[in-house]
Image: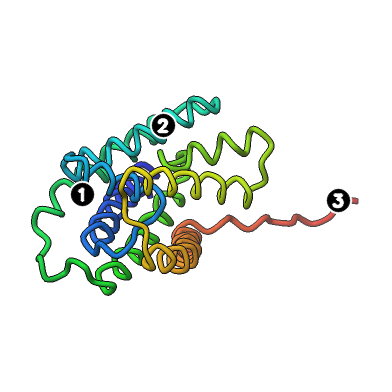
Amino acid sequence: MNPWLVLVVGYLVLGVGISLMLHGNVGVASWEVVTDALIGLGLSPGFAVLGSFALAILLGLSLGVRPRPSTLVGMLLPALVVEVLLRGLPSAWAGSYVTLVVGALILGIGVGTYLHAGLGAAPGDLPFVGLLRRGFGRTTGKVTADASVTVLGWIAGGTVALGTILIVVIVGPVVACTTRVLTAWTDRRHPTPAVSVGRPTD
């Protein structure tokens, strides 16, 4: 399958997950805390997503990581989905842990899908990549990047609650499961040709 098509599908699904988590309003993931803060400052949901991802790109640039074309796709598509979808979600879904959990599951599927495309980091991952280049380990770099962004968003007025912990617990395994399923599906559709072993020569 065309990797760009996989990337686009992944980011569209990601936008749905972000929308549901924001609408649940009982906690969000790291960059969505910044998005939530920007919504609180008066930006529309879509522009708030653009603002949080623009901040991520600026932080990445400050750490020496330049965005790729795929990164810009990952900035625009989720913002468009959030802008449209949040206007139509039922008010009864707001303030619901069910909405949050479903959103986190969908978010994980979206992340696993765009990672499977293999076309580069999402906007929110650029600071993490920058820290890796500065000598941070994967775990230390990820925790540092996510914790810093979460605290920044919280100071600016974003929502940090029990749901944030649920998201951390849910998203990682769903991402891993999604990438495994997609890899297995790709391998079945495009199996690696067997290496033929000819008769030994005398």
Residue where numbered disc 1 is placed: 82
| Residue 57 marker | 2
Indicate the quadrant where residue 159 lies: bottom left
Q: CA distance from mark 2 to mark 3?
A: 58 Å
Check contact, mark 2 vs mark 1: CB within 8 A.
no
Q: CA distance from mark 1 to mark 3?
A: 64 Å
| Mark found first going from the N terminus, 1 or 3 | 1
Q: Residue at x 28, y 45 (%)?
A: 37
Instruction: Pick whichever, 61 or 94, lies toward us.
Output: 94
Numbered disc 2: secondary structure? helix
Numbered disc 3: secondary structure? loop
Numbered disc 1: secondary structure? helix
Indicate the quadrant where residue 43 lies: top left
In the rendered structure, which amino acid carries the disc numbered 3? Thr
Residue farthest bottom in this picture: 98
Image side of residue 107 versus residue 25, left or right: right
In the rendered structure, which amino acid carries the disc numbered 1? Val
Q: Residue at x 41, y 51 (%)?
A: 30
Q: Residue at x 50, y 49 (%)?
A: 147
Other residues around mark 3 within 10 Å, as few (<14) / some (14–19) / many (≥20): few
Instruction: Pick whichever, 108 or 26, lies toward us.
Output: 26
Other residues around mark 1 within 10 Å, as few (<14) / some (14–19) / many (≥20): many
| Mark found first going from the N terminus, 2 or 3 | 2
Other residues around mark 2 within 10 Å, as few (<14) / some (14–19) / many (≥20): many
- Residue 44 lies, with reference to residue 111, above or below; the image says above
Give residue 112's position: percent from left, percent from top. Answer: 43, 57
| Residue 148 marker | none
| Residue 201 marker | 3
Give residue 88's position: percent from left, percent from top. Answer: 8, 57
In the rendered structure, which amino acid carries the disc numbered 2? Ile
